[in-house]
Image (cartoon, rainbow, N blue to C red):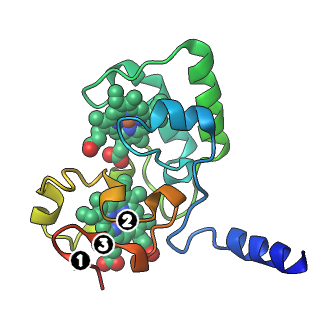
Amino acid sequence: MKKLLLITALGLSFAFAGSVAPADNAQYQKECASCHFGYQPALLSKASWEKVMGNLSDHFGTDASLGKVESEQILSYLVSNAGSGKITANNSTMQITKSPYFIKEHRKIPAKFIEQKEVNSIANCLACHTTADKGNYSERAIVIPNYGRWE
Ligand code: HEC
Ligand code: HEC
């Protein structure tokens, strides 16, 4: 039991060493992880999530609207778990991929690896971060299709 508690404490203190809390809300997974994987709430700030949820009918060229109640419940889940710190700093847009930290981390990836069909968009996190669905973005778990491990 003691051991278990220690592991949990270590897990939490991880806060950001390439790792964020997993998206553990069933409603969010159902509604927001069908077209793309469920981006973890900590990847965007509160202001960003408010914008995303306020513009669902015009969502990146598609209509992702929800009923009022569902939309309010999901917004509440997102804002109460929203991120702060380097990953969201100076980004109040609707895109994780517009954060200065995100741009800096990804600037060395040759365009051909992003444009290829296996990836297609830099917003397709799971194509390269093999453990992105668990909130783990650490370098050790990066495998770029047709390139391999990133060292
Ligand atoms: C009908 C399909 C669809 C649904 C449902 C959907 N999305 Fe999206 N979403 C998209 C598309 C398409 C993009 C653009 C992806 C790209 O640029 O590769 C996108 C992009 C995003 C981005 C920006 C990613 C980035 O950093 O560039 C966020 C954040 C996002 N969606 C959140 C949500 C949330 C929250 C929900 C649920 C309320 C949701 N999406 C539901 C289609 C959808
Ligand atoms: C084309 C492959 C690719 C895609 C798609 C991609 N990444 Fe990355 N990501 C990388 C690589 C490669 C690095 C390591 C860069 C370096 O350190 O030089 C990285 C680094 C990171 C880091 C820093 C990790 C650390 O340990 O410091 C985070 C966080 C991250 N990515 C999140 C994301 C998120 C969130 C998405 C989707 C919105 C995404 N990435 C999409 C390849 C990708």
Q: Residue furthest left?
A: 112
Residue 82 placement, left or right of 127: right
Quarter of the picture holding the N terminus: bottom right
Q: On the image, numbered disc 1 is attached to which residue?
A: 148
Vertical comparison of 72 with 144: above or below: above
Q: Residue furthest right?
A: 2
Quadrant of the displayed image that contains ligand 2: bottom left
Tags 1 and 3 touching, CB below 8 Å:
yes
Who is closer to the viewer here, 30 or 40? 30
Residue 99 placement, left or right of 41: left
In the rendered structure, find residue 143 and report the number of the disc placed on it: 3
Point out the tag, 2 or 1, that comes first from the N-terminus.
2
Can you see residue 94?
Answer: no
Q: Secondary structure at mark 2?
A: loop
Q: On the image, numbered disc 2 is attached to which residue?
A: 129
Residue 82 placement, left or right of 87: right
Q: Secondary structure at mark 3?
A: strand
Image location of residue 148, percent across then percent down: 23, 77
Quarter of the picture holding the C terminus: bottom left
Q: CA distance from mark 2 to mark 3?
A: 7 Å
Who is closer to the viewer here, 69 or 86? 69
